Amino acid sequence: MTADTPLNEKNGKTQFGVQSVEIGLRVLAVIAKAYQPMMLRDIARAMGMPSAKVHRYLVSLAREGMVEQEDTGARYSLGPLALTVGLAALHQLDVVKICSNAAADLRDRTNLTVLLAIWGSAGPTIVRWEESHRPIAINVRVGSVLTLLDSATGLVFAAFAPRHITEDKILEELHDHHDRDKIENTLAEIRARGVAIVRGNQLSSINAISAPIFDHTGTLVAALTILGPERRFNVMWDSQEATDLIEICDQLSERLGYSRKCGETSLQDSSKVPTK
């Protein structure tokens, strides 16, 4: 049960791991992904292992505080040590660094310019800019603040960020030239589709697709956006670029601890455009 197993090769040498540790971590992963206490038989079924064997791992994990049983002893959930480990991992996450690496990967995959934005004191602010091999002539760069209702990036924040954060800026831009009902319908569609699309609004002759990135609380922490000239970047909801963008943003959100279950509640706070 504690036999060494090959992990991978490094510097021409095979590295070995401890099989029992690997199996124990798989048990923890099954319980973690369930988001609720689990019966022994359900854990065993998910593991594809006999219940008696899984039970031995659960006993060891319980001794160390990684799992715990309910008072009835029928169900298992993550224990206090698992919580400590999870919180420590969250504190060590560097959101901008993690998302910036993905921005470069997306640029290489699509051969389009990619930007990463977070919410700053003045609104959606660019913190990373990955130029494509075919640069586009625009006057925004790292540090630039984008409009909330005219840019794809801004629309993502308007659709998914908590309303108390975006309310003042939304009202300010609504006063300019936007129809409240039309904006409300646009934001609802963005929430339903998971991406925002803009065709030459804020940046003339530039199309853009943007998608949200969430943290473990379901809070929007960043937006990743693909930019390209209208003549060669025909943005569509179901385009390959949109699919690639959503896939990468989902992976980043998962890396930051997000789950669909924790996101449902947070979206309720950003579902309506405020009144004047």
Image (cartoon, rainbow, N blue to C red):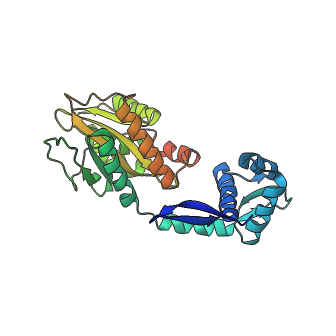
From the viewer's perspective, is 68 left or right of 265? right
Instruction: Name the residue at 14% across, 46% down.
Output: 139
In the rendered view, would you say 139 is above or below 209?
below
Q: Residue 208, image x and y in percent?
A: 28, 36
Q: Quadrant of the C terminus?
A: top left
Instruction: Name the residue at 48% across, 67% down.
Output: 91
In the rendered view, would you say 201 is above or below 266?
above
Q: Residue furthest front?
A: 12
In the rendered view, would you say 7 is above or below 47?
below
Asked whether residue 231 appears in the rendered view, the answer is yes
Foreground residue among 83 and 158: 83
From the viewer's perspective, is 44 left or right of 189? right
Q: Residue 252, image x and y in percent?
A: 44, 50
Q: Residue furthest right?
A: 72
Instruction: Name the residue at 25% across, 31% down.
Output: 233
In the rendered view, would you say 234 is above or below 94?
above
Q: Residue 152, image x and y in percent?
A: 30, 39
Foreground residue among 165 and 105: 105
From the viewer's perspective, is 83 left or right of 69? left
Q: Residue 77, image x and y in percent?
A: 72, 58
Q: Quadrant of the N terminus?
A: bottom right
Foreground residue among 97 and 8: 8
Foreground residue among 201 and 97: 97
